[in-house]
Image (cartoon, helix red, strand yellow):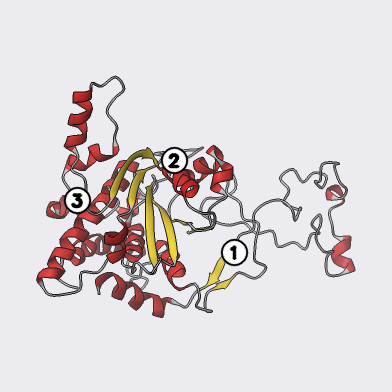
Amino acid sequence: MAPQQRIIIDTDPGVDDILALLLALSATPEEFEVLLISVTYGNVELDSCLKNVVALFHVLEKEKEWRKSKGLPQGFTTAETFKPIVAVGTSHPLAEEILMADFFHGRDGLGGVHSSHPHLSPSDAWKSLFTKAPPGSTDAEVEKANELGIPSTAFTASKAPAYQEILRLLRENEPDTITIIAVGPLTNLAIAAAEDPETFLRVKEVVPLVAAGSPLAEWVSVFMNTTYQKINSLTQGFADPGLSLHDPLTIWYMLTQSNPAWKAAPGAPEDIRVETAGQWTRGMHIVDRRNRRKLGGPKPDDASAQAQVDPSMQGDDGEGNLVNDEYGWLNVWKGNRINRIAESPGDLEFAPYLLNRIFG
């Protein structure tokens, strides 16, 4: 049976990203085919994000061995069935400086798990899996470089940039068959869209944020414990311990989007755009709630609202725009059409769902 969803995950693995990846990889082959994990900078530097992805697959191999020895279902069958590609993306934003969250996630993105639990971290040999031999290298040097990285049985390492892999997969598959789940900065997607807009438009949709004793439980408990310790230090005991897991929600939505409890925001779809320099805001949406008429759209609801229309914005500039509306915010034929999900089935459903899917 073909998978219901074929996905690319663009991620900057810190704590909640890893949980999102685990939730995706815990799906059955009938639910998900994870084609590509596209790694980007974000919560921490790019090299640390990439190491965390490789470590995830390293721990999953140990987890499956442990479960097998205990006579338990090994799980994570979609990763084993399809063997996703892992590709390295950009290390910096298109504009402005990098704004990392290592103060929260730890310098390695996972609360220092690589230092405290080195037996659960991969050897440094993985680095050469993603790097090409320097230009001008001899055939012998190229062969030696390839031998240094031992290919993983759990994923396929790509030496091509992540944006090229995104475009290749979209190009080689039928339009509207691949969904991109973006749980990190959108820079890889922006580069891909700028490089080949026609191919990028073949994407079906973009969904942005967007058991004790086992190797997986031991590994996850390290960065979850340090995360809760950080939360407690920030709240100083004045709030109940809790953790908002944003990134796994995108995977939960893709797995359960037929549930009517998922509801879009009133007025959806919305014209939500991305600005790259932090000019107006970082990590937030700005909504214009004024009752202003849009070019090509219906008139305001009543005469008093019509009278409040800014006179400087009336009239056509001859190119299909309202006067003084440089970016087309008041034009129904311009901008984006985004369904912003405002309601979910709720945390009481999500918590057991996440734990059961990942830990069995």
The kind of secondary structure element at disc 1 is: loop
Spot occupied by residue 31 in the image (x, y as percentages of width and height):
39, 69
- Compared across the picture, whether 148 is left or right of 349 comes to left
Asked where in the image residue 141 lies, by quadrant, the reply is top left
Residue under pointer 2: 164
User: Answer yes or no: do the residues labelled 3 and 2 have beta carbons within 8 Å?
Assistant: no
Residue at 36% from the left image edge and 64% from the top image edge: 24
The kind of secondary structure element at disc 2 is: helix
- Compared across the picture, whether 303 is left or right of 220 comes to right
User: Answer yes or no: do the residues labelled 1 and 2 have beta carbons within 8 Å?
Assistant: no
- Amino acid type, mark 1: Asn
Residue under pointer 1: 339
Q: Nearer the viewer, residue 136 or 119?
A: 136
CA gap, disc 3 to disc 2?
30 Å
Instruction: Tell me which numbered mark, 3 or 2, is placed earlier along the sequence.
Output: 3
CA gap, disc 1 to disc 2?
27 Å
**Other-residue count near label 3 (Cα within 10 Å), few / some / many at <14 / 14–19 / ≥20:** many
- Amino acid type, mark 2: Gln
Residue 268 numbered mark, or none: none
**Front position among marks 3 and 2:** 2
Q: Nearer the viewer, residue 6 or 236?
A: 6
CA gap, disc 1 to disc 3?
38 Å
